[in-house]
């Protein structure tokens, strides 16, 4: 090695070695190793080296930032590219290195093949490591990039792999097993993340636990096709990585042009899955654009009226919403031209005067007069063939054929994708949306994306990459033109919730399921990356429209309370007791959101598979909110004790059950701390011994509020 770089921040260190030839190598990514001298770093190099020369292969056994065959690497190459149909095997020479305490930028070149590579490693707030590459064609011929991926090494002790799958409306289901030998990839090629997106890949020493154990994680900040990868080869340390999935011919930088990868976010934790969450949440909350104002209580009209828009009823619904404490009123699908069902109208972002004869101005004015924000639903990236837009501009449909409809022009939910990479199409949508934001004073847009991209072809080439950047640009432009406008990312629920879309939106809709039993796990795994204030969570009616399951209002409220809360419900149908309960819920949410949306998320480890425990502890540990819920019947009549992790053992806490919205039901075990009067319990008892639970019935929930005594 000719030298080393050590990056350090928030308990994380990355040690990079600079060899005589080729790209730098990562010697260590994990715990902060303290202040190391150059002699210490040289010792680290010796202590972790594979072998001395002559080895069994005359090549570098340290894996560089972009591993290739020339490095003795038999796994998936970090870069696969061709020029003129011939494969490229780069030989990199480092031209420039820029560094500070937490960031390293390396510029390398291969003059023979006409390539320039810039790589950034940066440890941000919370210890989140950002890694991105930019490849520039410095040659004279076009370059074809098959992939360029971000990878980091993890120890051989990492023997378990957790990835995610799911479906509508049951997103983000974790699947854990032994880390497979060899090179494995998990791909998503839906043109959006999708409900079965990889989401996060985690490798761990043993099966991952909530509160203990080492975990290494990667998430790709990209809202379309992705590849997550692991490489466990016998000759090398294990690699963990991710990158954009590119179709053949999709990325062809001309001479002088570049391809920049999406940012891969790597997180190491010594405290289990909650340690991963804490690092992601701290990083997200430190962003300049992170929401700083209290997250408003929302009412969205979808499950209240669906496509049956009656101005009189919706105005009554707005008045009732204001009465119970709603702060943001969102008119969902069905307001625009000829939109009486989901087969017509997408792309025509003008108010349907047949339904709204006076336009939406009176409703927006009423909502604002009632002290609420006004929100409106759009699906800007989509089009129905039965629309004025499609009839006038069929060439704006993103498809492998322009003769639509046709056997190979596959629709999805009777809708197609609008090719926003075409400037005229982009400008048409921007103009219509911007005009409505100005006219109505729209405060919030629910931005939906209800289908996969099937055979997306733009100007004769795969179009997913260009479409995604066009959508990003549209969001960026609308927010720049309308300061203060907030946007929610919805994609048939939680189909697009990555950090790429959240670089420009203000929250996500976690799922179209408002079934609180399903929501317990959907929200828990969405919170692996996103803090609660970014995760839309609404109280729906019972039975739930997505599952038909009936649940108590108290259970639905307890589940929704732990996110960016609201209603998805025709609350005009509520009886007097329900109105009182949801009014109490609104007040409770406003009381507790200061803790819920700034504190540290904790998930105490439990034994019973029917238990779900979620807590948020204030930054100064003076206050906390925990929900203890069941998703099925408990195994034992005398249930386990639950340790309320994250509290200060040296303090005492007043413990109250917040049952203003309805009491949970349980069997014969009623612990002494449940009563009319709050009890004071030492933090050392709550964290070290635990809280004896009642025998909660299936699908019941307790809301516990702890304040320093």
Image (tube, helix red, strand yellow):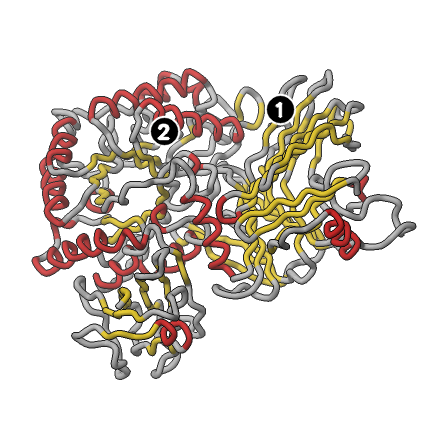
Residue at x 11%, y 58% (from the top left corner):
580
Left or right position of 555 against 146:
left
State the residue in front, 12 or 248.
12
Single out the mark in the foreground, 1 or 2: 1
Label 2 belongs to which residue?
Answer: 380
> In 3D space, how far apart are the residues under numbered discs 1 and 2 (Cα atoms)?
28 Å
User: Does the rendering let one see residue 77?
Assistant: no
x then y, percent, for residue 595 = 30, 54
x then y, percent, for residue 261 = 59, 33
Residue pushed farthest left? Answer: 576
Q: SS for tag 1?
A: strand
State the residue in front, 524 or 178.
524
Residue pushed farthest right? Answer: 54
Residue at x 16%, y 29% (from the top left corner):
355
State the residue in front, 174 or 158.
158
Mark linked to residue 385: none
Left or right position of 221 against 703:
right
Nearer the N terminus, badge 1 or badge 2? 1
Is 550 drawn above or below residue 473 in the view shown? Answer: below
Label 1 packing within 10 angstroms: few (<14), some (14-19), many (20+): some
User: Does the rendering let one see residue 399?
Assistant: yes
Mark linked to residue 258: 1
Left or right position of 164 against 112:
left
Q: SS for tag 2?
A: loop
Residue at x 28%, y 44% (from the top left corner):
295
Label 2 packing within 10 angstroms: few (<14), some (14-19), many (20+): many
| Quadrant assignment for the N terminus | top right
x then y, percent, for residue 670 = 25, 81
Query: Is mark 1 in CB contact (under 8 Å) with mark 2?
Result: no
């Amino acid at each position: 090695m000719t030298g080393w770089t050590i990056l350090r921040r928030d308990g994380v260190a990355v040690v990079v070695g600079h060899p005589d030839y080729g790209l730098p190598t990562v010697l260590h990514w994990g715990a902060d190793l303290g202040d190391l001298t150059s002699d210490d770093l040289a010792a680290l190099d010796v202590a972790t080296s594979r072998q001395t020369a002559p080895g069994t292969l005359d090549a570098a056994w340290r894996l560089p930032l972009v591993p290739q065959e020339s490095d003795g690497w038999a796994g998936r190459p970090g870069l696969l590219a061709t020029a003129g149909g011939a494969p490229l095997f780069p030989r990199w020479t480092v031209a420039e290195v820029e560094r500070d305490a937490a960031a390293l930028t390396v510029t390398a070149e291969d003059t023979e093949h006409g390539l320039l590579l810039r790589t950034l490693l940066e440890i941000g707030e919370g210890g989140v490591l950002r890694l991105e590459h930019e490849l520039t064609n410095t040659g004279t011929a076009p370059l074809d990039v098959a992939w360029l991926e971000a990878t980091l090494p993890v120890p051989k002790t990492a023997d378990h792999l957790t990835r995610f799958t799911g479906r509508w409306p049951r997103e983000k289901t974790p699947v854990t097993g032994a880390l497979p030998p060899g090179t494995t990839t998990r791909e998503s090629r839906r043109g959006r993340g999708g409900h079965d997106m990889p989401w996060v890949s985690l490798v761990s020493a043993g099966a991952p636990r909530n509160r203990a154990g080492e975990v290494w994680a990667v998430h790709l900040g990209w809202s379309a096709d992705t590849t997550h990868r692991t490489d466990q080869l016998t000759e090398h340390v294990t690699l963990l990585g991710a990158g954009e999935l590119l179709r053949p011919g999709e990325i062809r930088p001309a001479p002088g042009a570049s391809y920049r990868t999406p940012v891969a976010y790597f997180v190491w934790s010594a405290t289990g899955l909650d340690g991963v969450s804490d690092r992601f949440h701290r990083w997200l909350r430190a962003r300049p654009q992170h929401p700083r104002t209290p997250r408003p209580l929302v009412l969205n009209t979808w499950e209240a009226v669906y496509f049956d828009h009656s101005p009189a009823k919706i105005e009554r619904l707005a008045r009732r919403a204001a009465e119970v404490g709603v702060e943001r009123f969102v008119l969902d699908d069905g307001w625009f031209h000829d939109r009486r069902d989901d087969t017509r109208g997408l792309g025509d972002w003008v108010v349907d005067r047949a339904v709204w004869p006076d336009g939406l101005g009176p409703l927006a004015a009423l909502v604002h007069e009632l002290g609420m924000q006004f929100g409106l639903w759009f699906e800007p990236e989509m089009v129905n063939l039965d629309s004025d837009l499609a009839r006038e501009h069929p060439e704006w449909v993103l498809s492998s054929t322009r003769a639509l409809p046709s056997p190979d022009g596959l629709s999805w939910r009777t809708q197609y994708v609008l090719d926003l990479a075409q400037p005229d199409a982009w400008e048409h949508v921007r103009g219509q949306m911007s005009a409505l934001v100005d006219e109505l004073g729209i405060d919030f847009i629910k931005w939906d994306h209800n289908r996969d991209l099937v055979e997306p072809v733009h100007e004769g080439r795969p179009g997913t990459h260009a479409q995604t950047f066009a959508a990003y640009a549209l969001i960026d432009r609308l927010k720049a033109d309308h300061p203060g406008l907030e946007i929610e990312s919805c994609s048939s629920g939680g189909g697009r919730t990555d950090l790429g879309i959240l670089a420009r939106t203000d929250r996500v809709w976690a799922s179209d399921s408002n079934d609180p039993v399903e929501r317990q796990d959907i929200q828990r795994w969405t919170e692996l990356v996103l803090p609660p204030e970014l995760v839309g969570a609404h109280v729906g009616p019972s039975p739930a429209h997505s599952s038909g399951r009936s649940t108590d209002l108290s259970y639905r409220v307890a589940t929704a309370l732990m996110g960016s809360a609201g209603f998805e419900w025709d609350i005009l149908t509520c009886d007097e007791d329900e109105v009182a309960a949801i009014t109490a819920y609104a007040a409770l949410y406003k009381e507790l959101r200061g803790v819920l949306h700034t504190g540290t998320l904790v998930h105490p480890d439990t034994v019973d598979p029917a238990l779900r425990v979620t807590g948020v502890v204030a930054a100064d540990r003076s206050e906390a909110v925990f929900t203890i819920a069941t998703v099925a019947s408990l195994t034992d009549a005398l249930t386990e004790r639950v340790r309320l992790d994250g509290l200060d053992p040296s303090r005492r806490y007043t413990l109250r059950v917040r049952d203003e919205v309805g009491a949970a039901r349980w069997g014969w075990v009623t612990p002494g701390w449940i009563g009319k009067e709050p009890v004071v319990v030492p933090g050392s008892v709550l964290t070290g011994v635990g809280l004896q639970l009642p025998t909660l019935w299936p699908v019941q929930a307790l809301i516990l509020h702890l304040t320093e005594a």
